[in-house]
Amino acid sequence: MYAVVKTGGKQYKVAIGEKLKVEQIPADINSEIVLEEVLLIADGEKVAVGTPLIAGASVKATVLSQGRHDKVRIFKMRRRKHYQKRQGHRQNYTELQITAING
């Protein structure tokens, strides 16, 4: 059984027991959250597709950690113009473990 959920402007395919890192969600560690934007639920041969969301469906997850991804380095350069610009970015994330899919 798996589901496709939308959080942080992105879509994720999730299954029970799976861990994933999503855009930062303001929640405490070890707390349980409910993702209500469910786009699809598949259980074997049975597939339910929302238009765009499935009414009454939800995915429960436990917050494992809050953190930051590795640094992404941005380097801009114009050749022969003596222009160089360096910048870095670290994106915040929330690590979730999927505990239940309710459809």
Image (cartoon, grey):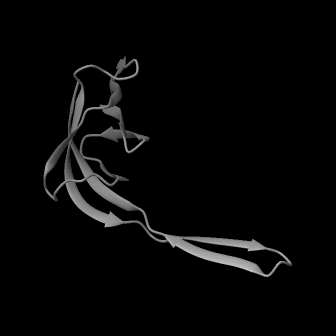
Residue 24 occupies which quadrant of the picture? bottom left
- The foreground one among 58 and 79 is 79
The residue positioned 24% from the left and 46% from the top of the image is: 17
Q: For the view shown, which residue lies furthest in the bottom direction? A: 82
Placement of the N terminus among the 4 image quadrants: top left
> Residue 78 at x, y = what percent?
79, 72
Where's residue 83, x and y in %? 75, 78
Judge left or right: residue 26 versus residue 69: left
Quadrant in the picture for the C terminus: top left
Name the residue at 29% across, 56% down: 95
Q: Residue furthest right?
A: 80
**Image label count:** 0
- Front one among 100 and 51: 51
In the rendering, at what x and y percent does residue 22 appear? 36, 51
Residue at the left extreme, as displayed: 31
Residue at the image position 13 percent from the left and 56 percent from the top: 30
In the image shown, does 50 or 83 lie closer to the viewer? 83
36 with respect to 5 (left or right): left
**Residue 81 position in % (x across, y down):** 83, 78
Q: Is residue 74 above or below residue 33?
A: below
Residue 58 lies in what quarter of the image?
top left
Quadrant of residue 80 in the image? bottom right
**Eyeballing the image, is 89 above or below 35?**
below
- Determine whether 42 is above or below 97 in the image: above
Choose between 80 and 57: the one closer to the eye.
80
Q: Is residue 25 above or below residue 99?
A: below
Left-right relation of 98 to 23: left
Give the residue drawn at x 22%, y 22%.
56
